């Protein structure tokens, strides 16, 4: 894959799926991020973040989407994944927009598909980057291979 790639029609579909998921389930301070992933066999799964009163119990939207994919298909890899954030009510004139995966999600995505493509913000637009590029010098148990 090129270092960065423009969005394909399929990438835009994924952003639309993530956007639809969070628009449907947005709740102030509880659900504000949506995610969508396409598995290697081409199925799309969506997720929303699960915030929690105890912060350490919070789960990111990407993990929820991955869990849904796993329940249905088992390990089918992640061809492409994206997360989007819904604006809060006081953020007038803001639209749902692509956000970068957090550090923990970068680890998770890499663990489940080290060739995953990730849609990330690029100014007001978005672009595609390989997960490995978002996680240089990743932690490994044991010696380098
Ligand atoms: Zn995350």
Image: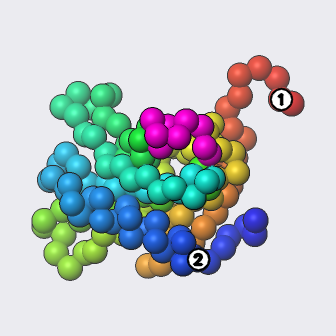
Asked if one can make out residue 66 in the rendered structure from this viewpoint, the answer is no
Q: Position of residue 54 (x, y in %)?
A: 23, 27
- At label 2, counting other C-alpha atoms closer than 10 Å, the crowd grade (few under 14, some 14-19, many 20 or more) is few
Q: Position of residue 80 (x, y in %)?
A: 57, 58
- At label 1, counting other C-alpha atoms closer than 10 Å, the crowd grade (few under 14, some 14-19, many 20 or more) is few
Span highlighted in magenta in the image: 69-77
Query: On the picture, is 65 further left or further right than 32?
Result: right
Q: Position of residue 84 (x, y in %)?
A: 38, 61
Mark in the foreground, 2 or 1: 2
Q: Earlier in the sequence, mark 2 or mark 1?
A: 2
* Rendered image quadrant of residue 112: top right
**CA gap, disc 2 to disc 1?**
35 Å
- The residue labelled by disc 1 is 144
Residue at the spot x=39%, y=53% of the render? 46
- The residue labelled by disc 2 is 8
Q: Position of residue 59 (x, y in %)?
A: 35, 37
Residue at the spot x=18%, y=31% of the render? 53
């Amino acid at each position: 894959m090129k270092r960065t790639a423009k969005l394909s029609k399929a990438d835009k579909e994924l952003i639309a799926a993530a956007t639809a998921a969070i628009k449907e389930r947005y709740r102030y301070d509880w659900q504000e991020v949506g995610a969508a992933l396409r598995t290697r066999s081409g199925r799309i799964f969506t997720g929303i973040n699960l915030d929690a009163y105890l912060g350490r119990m919070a789960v990111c939207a990407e993990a929820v989407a991955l869990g849904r994919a796993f329940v249905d298909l088992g390990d089918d890899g992640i061809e492409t994944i994206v997360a989007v954030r819904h604006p809060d009510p006081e953020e007038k004139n803001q639209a749902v927009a692509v956000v970068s995966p957090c550090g923990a999600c970068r680890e998770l995505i890499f663990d489940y598909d080290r060739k995953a493509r990730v849609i990330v913000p690029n100014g007001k637009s978005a672009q595609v980057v390989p997960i490995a590029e978002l996680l240089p010098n990743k932690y490994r148990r044991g010696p380098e291979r």
